[in-house]
Image (tube, helix red, strand yellow):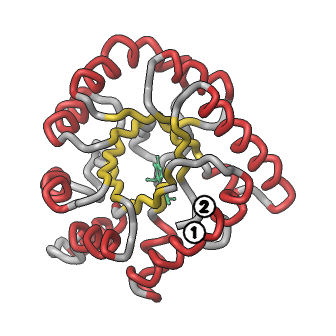
Amino acid sequence: MNLLVNIDHVATLRNARGEGYPDPIEAAKVCEEAGAAGIVFHLRGDRRHIRDADVFRLKDHVRGKLDFEMAATDEMLDICIEVQPHLCTLVPEGREELTTEGGLKMESVFDDFNSRVIPRLKDSGIEISLFLDPNPEDIRLAHKLGVDAIELHTGTFANAPDGKKQHELTRLRKGAALINELGMKANAGHGLNLENLPDLLETIPNLNEVSIGHALISKSLFWGMEKTVKAYLEIIEDFYGS
Ligand code: PXP
C-alpha cells in the first residue's frame, strides 16, 4: 500500500507572500527521499496553490508515482495529457469551496465522462481514478466507464463525531470491497491524519494507495517533513507490512 503526499499547501504558503519559496518541488523531493511512493497535486481552475509551471517541474523531478488531481474541464484535460502523469484523479471542483467537498455524483457526470472525458484519458494511456463517496451506485457507474481505480472520499469519516465514525468506516470497508470485486483498485484520501489513519487501515485491508496532504504538511512545520512522512509510513507498515 502506497503513501502519496499531496504537496498543494506548500504552494499555498509560497503564494501567501508571492516569493519563490517554499518550493513544492523541493517538498516533493524530501517526501520521496523519506520513502513516499509518490506525489499528488491538484491544479485548480483558479490556480490558488499549484500553478502550471509547478506541474511541469513536478513531472521532471518526481521519481515515483505522479497523481494529477483535477476537475474534468477541457483545459485540465489538455494539460494532463501533455504532462502524462501516471495517474489522473478526477474530482468535482467548486469555485467557492475551501477544499474538495465530496465525491463525484456519477449519475450527473456519467454521460459527459463517457463521451468526452474518459476516451481522451484512455487514449493517452494515463491511469484513471474517480474520487467518490462510498456509495455502491456511484461505484457501479464508475466501473461501467472502465476506470482503473476509485479514490474513496474519507472526509466524512475524518470529520464524523466519535459516535458516527464506525458507521462511516463500515461504509468505506464495503465500498472498498465492492471496488475490488469489480476489478478496480481502491485508493483513499481526504482528511486523513496520524490519529485517524490507523482506524482506516485496520478496517480496510485492501487499499492500494492513500493520498494525504493538509495534515501531513501542517505537522511538517513542527516535526520536519522527513520525520513526518516516516511517521505515516510507520503506521502503514504496522498494518500492511513494508
Ligand atoms: N484526495 C483528494 C481527491 C483531494 O481532493 C484531497 C484534497 O486536495 C486529498 C486527497 C487530500 O486531502 P487532505 O489535504 O485533507 O489530506
Q: Callout 2: 10 Å neighbours few (<14), some, many (20+)?
A: some
Camera-nearest residue between 96 and 239: 239
Give the secondary structure at mark 2. helix
Give the secondary structure at mark 1. helix
Write down the residue under mark 2.
240
Camera-nearest residue between 202 and 100: 202
Horizontal arrangement in the rendering, residue 117 relative to residue 74 (left or right) = right
- The amino acid at mark 1 is Glu
Q: What residue is rendered at 35% in x and 54% in y?
A: 40
Q: CA distance from mark 2 to mark 1?
A: 5 Å
Say whether marks 2 and 1 touch (CB < 8 Å).
yes
Q: What residue is rendered at 82% in x and 53% in y?
A: 166
* Picture coordinates of residue 235, whole percent (x, y): 60, 71
Note whether 62 is above or below 176 in the view shown. below
Picture mark count: 2
Horizontal arrangement in the rendering, residue 180 relative to residue 74 (left or right) = right
* Picture coordinates of residue 159, whole percent (x, y): 68, 58
Q: What residue is rendered at 50% in x and 38% in y?
A: 131
* Picture coordinates of residue 15, whole percent (x, y): 24, 68
Write down the residue under mark 1.
237
- The amino acid at mark 2 is Tyr
Q: What residue is rendered at 47% in x and 66% in y?
A: 214
Camera-nearest residue between 70 and 184: 184
Residue 122 quadrant: top left
Horizontal arrangement in the rendering, residue 202 relative to residue 126 (left or right) = right
